[in-house]
Image (cartoon, rainbow, N blue to C red):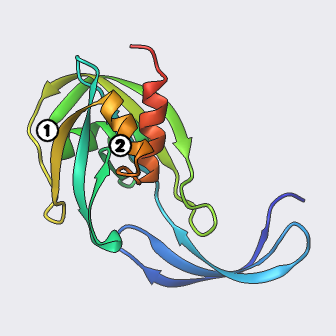
Amino acid sequence: MDKAIGNRTTLIRKGRVFDFYAENITLPNGVSMDMEIIRHPGAAAIVPVTNDGSVLLLKQYRHAVGGFIWEIPAGTLDPGEDARGCAERELIEETGYAARHFERLAEITPLPAYSDERIHLFRATGLTRSAQNLDEDELLFVHRVELRLAMKMIAEGEIQDAKTIVGLQLAANRPG
């Protein structure tokens, strides 16, 4: 046995984006325990690369961490939506750019201790201007940053968001 067995699951709160559950499980080693889990529909995140090799980064307000942070564009999958479709939609909505090409970079699990969220990472190229369409609760500013400078921002701790760090690192190691 290499997977926990769920003995009891109770919905604690149904949220706008994710749901919060209390679960009683039996671990693969036979130990039973209670835990809280966030069930998340998944997300897509995009590293938009301009023709000159720069990237589009967002300076986005995040209340939970107390202010603005650097991020790549990202968003939650809508019901029935695939990751690529979500990436295409979120890129336009958040940056005001569309892309001709999307390359899948990876799938990451950012919070495996208490969430089943999976983030699908893409590199987007062939950018063309479109119309930005932010949600009412999105407060962000789009910045064009040289990839070399973005990597320095990671090294100096200026970029701390995990999906952004992974996405930029993977994109930096891709040719073209």
Which one is in front, 48 or 9? 48
In the picture as drawn, the residue positioned furthest to the top comes out as 176
In the picture as drawn, the residue positioned furthest to the front comes out as 156
Which one is in front, 170 or 94? 170
Mark earlier in primary sequence (2, 1): 1
x, y percentage for residue 62? 28, 66
Whether residue 162 sits left or right of residue 51 in the image: it is: right
Q: Nearer the viewer, mark 2 or mark 1?
A: 2
In the picture as drawn, the residue positioned furthest to the left comes out as 131
Residue 153 circle label: 2
Confirm whether residue 82 shows in the render: no
x, y percentage for residue 67? 25, 67
Q: Quadrant of residue 150?
A: top left
Give the amino acid type for the residue marked by disc 2 in the picture. Met
Q: Quadrant of residue 72?
A: top left
Q: Residue at x 50, y 77 (%)?
A: 20
Q: Residue at x 13, y 64 (%)?
A: 136
Secondary element at tag 2? helix
Q: Residue at x 67, y 80 (%)?
A: 35
Q: Residue at x 48, y 41 (%)?
A: 166
Answer above or below: position of 171 versus 25.
Answer: above
Q: How crowded is the residue under tag 1: few (<14 C-alpha within 10 Å), some, or many (20+)?
A: some
x, y percentage for residue 47? 35, 35
x, y percentage for residue 50? 24, 23
**Residue designated by label 1:** 96
Q: Please identify the quadrant where the C terminus is shown.
A: top left
